Amino acid sequence: MCGIVAYIGKKKAYPIILEGLKRLEYRGYDSAGIALLNGKMEVLKKKGKVSELEKHASENLKNFDYTMGIGHTRWATHGIPNDVNAHPHVSNSGDIAIIHNGIIENYDSIKKALVERGHTFHSETDTEVLAHLIEEIQRTEKQPLEESVRLALKKCIGAYAIVVMDKNNPEKLVGAKLSSPLVLGIGEDEFFLASDASPIIKYTNRVIYLNDGEIVTINRNKGYSIKNLSNETQNPEVSQLDLKLDEIEKGGYDHFMLKEIFQQPVTVAESMKGRINSQEGWAILGGMKPNIARIAKSKRIVLTACGTSWHSAMIGEYLLEDLARIPTEVEYASEFRYRNPVIKENDFIVALSQSGETADTLAAIKMAKNKGAYVYGIVNVIGSSIARETDSGSYIHAGPEIGVASTKAFTSQSTILALMALYLGHHKGLIEETYFRKLLAELESVPTKIARILAKDDHIKYIAGEIRNASNALYLGRGYNFPVALEGALKLKEISYIHAEGYPAAEMKHGPIALIDMYMPVIVLATNKSAYEKVVSNIQEVKARKGIVIAIVTEGDEIIKEIADFIIEIPEIEEPLTPLLSVIPLQLLAYHIAVMRGCHVDQPRNLAKSVTVE
Ligand code: G6P
């Protein structure tokens, strides 16, 4: 939610920052801006995507020789997306420029006090108060820039990752972090600050992930120093980035989302690597191993997450209850954290997050930890806040996911949850050995089976063409396929803006059936062995009301073929692993419909990939 990038060094700052903003655009894309310093401060801001800023800069930037600067791509919280509310924001004198990701919750009271002291504000944002406050402290208390930033931040409540640039300190950049991510890149005679490592990787693989409450001061020639809000010097570890440039590029695909859908045979295999062996008959998650006895005795598992991660958590509920026989609940992180839940010492709390930065999920685990629970993370982004905040965890190893609509993270999270359920169930002696080994072998076969579904892309695209003009869509599934129905509906509404709902198939007759007519596509997940006849009846009910049925069926299904308007076959698999396959055609269907409707697939309107506000 908002991307920030800053550069100081010997190279031209503008192209580095612009390219960095394009890489961070997944975090927000309603407006963008840049400030460059070279004796004079140049600030350019534009409503719209980074490409609008680029166009504006090519027409208005007189020279490109600046060797330091800051840039921002915004997802609006305070104030509509327009040129004025876009970042950077500047101080009263215009000497200090700031970019910010997060929310200053007490900005209103700070602003009122500043206005009383003669400050004039131009934007509706919370961020602008920080620029004014820093400058006021700098001038009235005669403090250096970094100390003025520290003192200003001590007056703020909320979340932030900021970078501050000062015309009167042309050798310095100051960054700070609390609850929003900030990475320092350390190159040869150059430094970078960014919301994630993607703008940095081209230049250096040496980074420091700043911790909450840390302030970094970069001096062009003298290096960097880090202090905390209490003014104590910190000595954080320098990490080596294990990220390759081609992982964050489209690699010949039209969209990141399509690339990520097609990567799934590889990413699911990566999630399993070293964690399963059907020949030897084991499934293990290293993060659980030291505590497996304690976890296996848990009275309850609570899975908490947001968005697509919440849907994979639901699959986890089915898996963990089915295979490990531990009562499991799924909680929206935003509800869990605010409703004073009962959390006991022998509860096992699992947080799922692709980005590892989702504010509500992060707050939920902090709350659970405060109540004494053991918290486990299932996270994609290495070194992210949730990964660091949890007691232990498993990375899903899906690689960077850039398309805003999550696809490969979902299948990788579900893979880890399947491994978790198998590991726990086997440890507890609840799964009969032959069935256990069968499930392991089936899980190992998932990548090949996903590839077989991806090979049907043309057929799925054809079906997309047939229903592209729908205004509504209904997704139905039972059992393991119910969370997949929710996820399929979410994919469609996120990127094509068609209103879609997911329902347990049997619930259709309690309401949604009233919506069905000849214009309503109903996507039915009909692969279940259990309750197969019941799903067939649900399809008949839709057809009796002239709905258009697109059925996801198991290869060789002859019955549904006769009733449905369209079928998409997926390979046979043991029922607990079905979601790993049945979601694939739904991802492709949503993708093609969105493309056909001319939607911006990778950056859907109003959304952001990393939601760092509550
Ligand atoms: C945003 C994204 C979704 C994502 C959700 C949770 O809404 O657009 O794709 O599922 O956040 O994100 P997380 O990173 O915690 O999985």
Image (cartoon, rainbow, N blue to C red):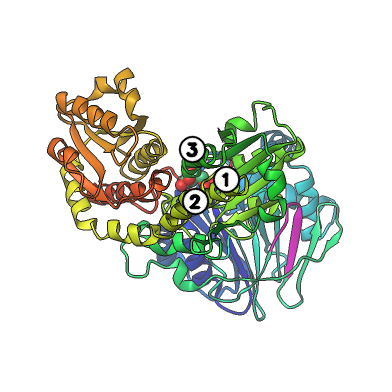
Question: Is the CB atom of the residue marked by disc 1 within 8 angstroms of ligand 1's nearest atom?
Answer: no
Which residue in the structure is indicated by mark 2?
A: 436
> Label 2 is placed on what type of residue?
Phe
Quarter occupied by residue 517: top left
Q: Which mark is residue 425?
A: 1
Membership of 159 in magenta stretch: no
Please tell me which residue lies in front, 517 or 264: 264
Q: Is residue 71 left or right of residue 479?
A: right
Regarding residue 356, the answer to whether it shows in the image is: no
> Label 3 is placed on what type of residue?
Tyr
Q: Earlier in the sequence, mark 3 or mark 1?
A: 3
Q: CA distance from mark 2 to mark 3?
A: 16 Å
Relative to 434, say whether 37 is above or below: below
Residue 261 lies, in percent from the top left, at 36, 57
> Label 1 is placed on what type of residue?
Gly
Q: CA distance from mark 1 to mark 2?
A: 9 Å
Residue 278 lies, in percent from the top left, at 49, 61
Circles 2 and 3: CB distance less than 8 Å?
no
Residue span colored magenta: 209-218
Q: Residue at x 52, y 70 (%)?
A: 14
Q: CA distance from mark 3 to mark 1?
A: 13 Å
Q: Is residue 498 left or right of residue 519?
A: right
Is most of the magenta stretch helix, strand or loop? strand
Q: Which mark is residue 318?
A: 3
Q: Residue at x 14, y 35 (%)?
A: 563
Circles 1 and 2: CB distance less than 8 Å?
yes
Q: Residue at x 78, y 63 (%)?
A: 226
Relative to 90, say whether 68 is above or below: below
